[in-house]
């Protein structure tokens, strides 16, 4: 099923101004294609959960339209939308066992006990809860409880699955496994899905496309690789991974970087003007001072061993520090804080944004 959001607005009463309004969602338009998993990503208060709740029917839009296929859904109650939601808090019944929790929604429909049993058992196996059907929620781990919540949504055979930060209560290892499991299940069933999170790694690993929101508006929509390597602006660049911004300028005489002549081997088609180069940690080569190979000279102010990479923070005169990732740190002698360093910008990793100042 396709989902279309057309110029959606949601206003709430303002706490700061009596009689005033706070715009939580500001003229948002979005198309989610059949079978696609699209994630709404952004900081707390950006409007992503409010948007999801309007799609589910839990909040009424101030204006704009919500369409499932060709049907306008604004006035359709939640229980008539054929959409199922998986909540952050699991929202499973503590007095019912696993099987009873999963089958709860089916009992509100005109189904026989045999049909309820068959659909429940099928979903139990699908989400990996086999052998746990008789357990109470208090006897389950956080990951198992979230699987119950997922199974209860899927067993209803919805046309649309909605996820409201479903993994935020799980530890890091469980979150990683549940991301994989949710994505496999969604692809296997082919259910159109909209997923809300503030976790950039979660969004990039689970999504067909990601919608980055800020202050009620969409900043950029795209596939994860595009958002990471070609962000539309400074906000997206900073929110999707680590990024530093180095000021440069293109004039009739060529390029300068931090006031020094520079040949970027990229950006040749850009018009003259001031830019900020977005630099990702893996888009920089680091060498000791005196190597004579770098574009920039700086000083190591922090080095952190992260297992698969050594992370350095390098102070550069006249601009913000740059984070650098060096892979396979066990093969290298780390540079200590206070040591001089040279940075070489990798041409393939450069992305030019209009200067903010």
Image (cartoon, rainbow, N blue to C red):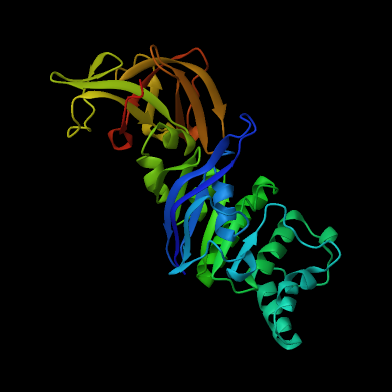
Q: Is residue 8 above or below residue 229?
A: below
Report the front residue among 279 and 160: 160
Residue under the point 46% across and 42% down: 217
Residue under the point 70% across and 84% down: 110
Relative horizontal placement of residue 328, taking residue 250 as reference (left or right): right
Relative horizontal placement of residue 169, taking residue 43 as reference (left or right): right
Relative horizontal placement of residue 42, taking residue 343 as reference (left or right): right
Q: Residue furthest left?
A: 252
Report the front residue among 231 and 80: 80
Report the front residue among 153 and 7: 7
Report the front residue among 117 and 126: 117
Can you give x and y, in whole percent of width and height, for residue 113 in the image?
76, 86
Can you give x and y, in whole percent of width and height, for residue 227 in the image?
40, 44
Can you give x and y, in whole percent of width and height, for residue 106 in the image?
71, 76
Determine which quarter of the picture holds residue 260.
top left
Determine which quarter of the picture holds residue 233.
top left
Q: Residue 307: in sight, yes or no?
A: no
Q: In this figure, what is the number of numbered marks?
A: 0
Which quarter shows the C terminus? Answer: top left
Can you give x and y, in whole percent of width and height, for residue 138 in the image?
85, 58
Q: Residue furthest right?
A: 95
Q: Is residue 246 above or below residue 65?
A: above
């Amino acid at each position: 099923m396709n989902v279309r959001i057309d110029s959606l607005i949601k206003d709430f009463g303002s706490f700061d101004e009596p009689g005033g309004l706070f715009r939580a969602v500001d003229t948002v338009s979005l198309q989610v294609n059949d079978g696609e998993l699209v994630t709404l990503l952004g900081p707390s208060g950006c409007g992503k959960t409010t948007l999801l709740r309007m799609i589910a029917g839990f909040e009424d839009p101030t204006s704009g339209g919500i369409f499932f296929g060709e049907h306008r859904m604004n006035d359709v109650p939640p229980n008539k939308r054929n959409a199922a939601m998986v909540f952050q808090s699991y929202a499973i019944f503590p007095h019912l066992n696993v099987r009873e929790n999963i089958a709860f929604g089916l009992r509100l429909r005109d189904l026989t006990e045999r049909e309820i049993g068959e659909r429940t058992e099928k979903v139990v196996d699908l989400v990996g809860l086999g052998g746990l059907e008789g357990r109470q929620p208090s006897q389950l781990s956080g990951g198992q409880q979230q699987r119950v919540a997922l199974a209860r949504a899927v067993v209803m055979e919805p046309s649309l699955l909605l996820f409201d930060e479903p993994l935020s209560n799980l530890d890091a290892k469980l979150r990683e496994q549940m991301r994989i499991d949710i994505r496999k299940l969604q692809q296997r069933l082919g259910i159109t899905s909209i997923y809300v999170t503030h976790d950039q790694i979660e969004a990039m690993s689970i999504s067909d496309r990601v919608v980055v929101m800020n202050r009620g508006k969409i900043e950029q929509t795209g596939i994860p690789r595009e958002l990471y390597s070609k962000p539309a602006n400074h906000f997206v660049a900073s929110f999707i991974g680590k990024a530093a911004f180095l000021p440069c300028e293109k004039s009739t005489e060529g390029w300068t970087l931090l006031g020094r002549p520079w040949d970027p081997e990229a950006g040749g088609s850009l018009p003259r003007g001031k830019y900020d180069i977005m630099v990702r940690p893996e888009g920089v080569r680091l060498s000791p001072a005196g190597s004579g190979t770098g574009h920039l000279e700086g000083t190591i102010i922090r080095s952190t061993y992260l297992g698969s990479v050594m992370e350095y923070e390098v102070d550069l005169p006249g601009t913000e520090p740059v984070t650098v990732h060096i892979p396979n740190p066990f093969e290298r002698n780390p540079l200590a804080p206070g040591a001089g360093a040279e940075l070489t910008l990798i041409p393939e990793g450069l992305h030019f944004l209009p200067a903010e100042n």
